[in-house]
Image (cartoon, coloured by chain):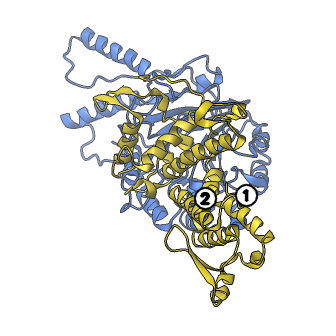
Chain colours: A blue, B yellow
Amino acid sequence: MKDRPKKMPGIKSIETKHMEEREELFRGLYDLDRRSFLKVSAAALGAIAGAGVTPHSFQPVTVAHAQPATGKVQQFRFAYISDSHLYERSLNDRFVNALMRAVDDVNAMDPQPDFVFYGGDLAQLGQAKELELGAQILKNLKAPLKVMVGEHDWYLDMGEKWRELFGPPTYSFDHKGVHCVVLNSVVEKDFWTERKLTPMQRMQTVAGLDNGVQSPFSVGADQRKWLENDLKGKPADTPIIVFSHSPLYKLYKNWNFWTDDAEEVQAILKRFNSVVVFHGHTHQMLTNRIGNIHFHGFLSTAWPWPYAPQGLPELTVQMSRPDPFNPNDGCGNGSVLVHPDGLVDKIYNLWNRNPVTVSRTYMLSRGAKDKPSVPVRKSY
Amino acid sequence: MMKQDVIGKSALLLAVAAACVASAACGGGQGAERPAANAQKEGSSGAGAASGNGPQTVSTASLAPNNVEVLLCDGKTKVNVPAGTPGTAIAGQLMAEWMRKNPSSTWEAEERERHTLQPAADNSALIGQVEGQTYGRITAQDVALWKTETERVATAGSRVFHNAEELGSTVGVSCDMCHPHAANTHPETYPKFQPQLGRVALLRDMINWCIEHPVRGKALASDDPRMRALEAYILAQRKGKALEYGKH
């Protein structure tokens, strides 16, 4: 509503009121998992019955959140889109349409998020036309955009085109009291020179998740040094958010759900009270906590990955096995509510299902409170 | 495989040709490489042909009057050798020439390096046992052959599985994009009633469904070599899982 010109303040048409109530309802529903949704629905029905009105309109529903956190952050929300794996439209428009759907989703958020974070793997084979197409679609976002690099963006020309479009892959910024750091965690050791691979062969090797010729991802000594410098002098109570394309822990090496120097990076982050790491690459609901560091995965807009056959973190509540007959199932985007203490509610906006919130309280209580609903059909 | 002292020269050439047919039919590769290497070693100890392994020698030798031209079973590859050249040396030359013209003949080793394959079952406990009239006594070579050949079919499947072109995709999509290492293909649950299809599906029905829909290719016939290979690979990757047909 904010963006529309208001010609006659105070006077609203029936349509406007209807749309406002509707958006209010959806804003409330946005944070709900299925169980709370049923609770709210029941309450709404009760309210309708009590008021003696026919349910002709959207009934305003307020969603009470758990105990509010205190801290130095001015609470805010950002949205995320990740892993779109674009081919050129002439070859495959399904992934292109999916990214456009995510952009529409985010643009429909009201209030708008403070920024939109893109989690990497914009292109499938790192080609200039794929990256340009992605950049062009992302320009349609209303909110400011921050972009991270993924391995699919990088290994054709070693990031040349990506840097031309989006700038350096390693950077930091401050937002409403949170210090945000963006890393390039997909650095691989040179496996291509000895094998005399062409740039495209190198790219295709890295693009295969289960391709064992490539080397494990890492952040690398240079960036670790950069990170140390970047965080130097920051007091321990500065809330930190880190973005890395691969999970900054070791989950499953065979699919590079893995960062080889994860422990070293975690050691740099250890002294801070509140650290949240967001990563792409895994295309699934994925949650972990190591000491004070909370980890959340992003959904992909292109396709979901199966869960790794071993090493799944205890806090992870799996998403239900995707239905292959629905090309959008298991895909989506989402948003993050950053609380005053710097910890977050992570909202998975699964396109074909109810949204799922992995809340700050779930993470703080190590899974004892606010557990998201467990899937009916687990991964094989 | 070939014993020079038992079979005559012409018979040997036939044997070489047959071995080449066999290896070419399954795409060349390891099986083809090994006999060639052996042949070269034996050939170098033989008379006259010690330096005659490469194709270059063939052209000079072709000037000699009493030369024999030997054609490989592919109908294209040929070598020209002096009469009396040991059969193993001829085989070596033919194979070297064939390998030179078929650089992708190491596809199997390359595919195995790229994509981990669950090994086929180990039957070495059977070595030395008598298996009646069918097998005679089972040798280490028998057991090795079973394993190599079985894994070769699965490896061929791995290659199709990871290759949008082989699958006939019109949208650049291959199986591994959703199923790394064939994860979440659960072949052990078929046949099962697939509500989305309204009927009972076999693994190959689901493979074809995926080929037609996300992959946007043409469904494969049940006996298409690619279908057989895909089934082999997918089943191989679920080694050790209990069969649970009908499971959802």
Whether marks 1 and 2 lie on the same chain: no
Q: CA distance from mark 1 to mark 2?
A: 29 Å
Number of other residues with Cα within 10 Å of mark 1, as a class: few under 14, some 14 to 19, many 20 or more: few
Q: Position of residue A339 (x, y in %)?
A: 58, 32
Provide the residue designation for mark 1.
Answer: A189
* Residue identifier under label 2: B29
Which numbered tag is attached to residue B123? none
Identify the residue shown where x is 77% and y is 65%: B41
Q: In the rendered image, which quarter is residue A192 located in?
A: bottom right
Q: Residue at x 60, y 53 (%)?
A: B111
Tell me which chain the residue with mark 2 is part of. B
Q: Is residue B209 left or right of residue A148?
A: left
Give the letter of the chain under mark 1.
A
Q: What secondary structure is marked by label 1?
A: loop
Q: Position of residue B208 (x, y in %)?
A: 37, 43
Q: Residues within 10 Å of mark 2 (few under 14, many from 20)?
A: many
**Taking A155 as reference, is A266 above or below it?**
above
The vertical placement of B158 against A287, above or below, is: below
Q: Are marks 1 and 2 in contact (CB under 8 Å)?
A: no
Q: Quadrant of the N terminus of chain A?
A: top left
Q: Is residue B201 above or below residue A91?
A: above
- Residue kind at label 1, given as amino acid type: Lys
Q: Residue at x 80, y 69 (%)?
A: B45
Residue A241 visible in rendering: no
Residue pictured at 55% horizontal, 60% vertical: B18
Question: Residue B109, position in %: x, y?
Answer: 64, 55
What is the three-letter code of the residue carrying label 2? Gly
In the image, residue A97 sits, relative to residue B73, either above or below, namely above
Q: State which quadrant residue B134 falls in.
A: top right
Q: Secondary structure at mark 2?
A: loop
